[in-house]
Image (spheres, grey):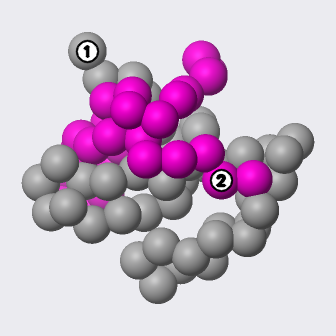
């Protein structure tokens, strides 16, 4: 998985299908988004993303995200 940075366009799967959005920050500790608490660390970071369709934020593990073209 290539490293992601703030502003990168990404895609991920949801129950409604594929969604696109933008990385808003790298999470390296405990963080909350969309009612979910992510327990990330410096060794296992996660990424906060903002959906282009709904504007809602979520936190995902890097393997769940794919860079959009």
Query: Toward which corner of the image does residue 29 lie, by quadrant?
Result: bottom right
Tag of residue 69: 1
Q: Which residue is mark 2?
A: 27
Q: Position of residue 54 (x, y in %)?
A: 15, 63
Q: Give whichever of discs 1 and 2 has the lower sequence position.
A: 2
Dot 2, crowdedness within 10 Å: few (<14), some or many (≥20)?
many
Number of numbered discs visible in the structure rendering: 2
Dot 1, crowdedness within 10 Å: few (<14), some or many (≥20)?
few
Which element is circle 1 on?
Answer: loop
Q: Is residue 50 left or right of residue 46?
A: left
Q: Position of residue 53 (x, y in %)?
A: 12, 54
The residue mark sitting in front, 1 or 2, is 2
Return the residue nearer the eye: 3 or 13: 3
Question: Magenta stretch?
Answer: 1-28
Q: Position of residue 43 (x, y in %)?
A: 87, 42
- Asked if the stretch drawn in magenta spans residue 44, the answer is no
């Amino acid at each position: 998985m290539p490293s992601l940075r703030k502003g990168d366009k990404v895609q991920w799967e949801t129950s409604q299908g594929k969604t696109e959005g933008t990385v808003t920050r790298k999470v390296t500790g405990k963080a909350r988004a969309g009612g979910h608490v992510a327990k990330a660390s410096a060794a296992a970071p996660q990424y906060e993303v903002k959906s282009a369709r709904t504007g809602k934020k979520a936190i995902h593990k890097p393997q769940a995200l794919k860079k959009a073209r």
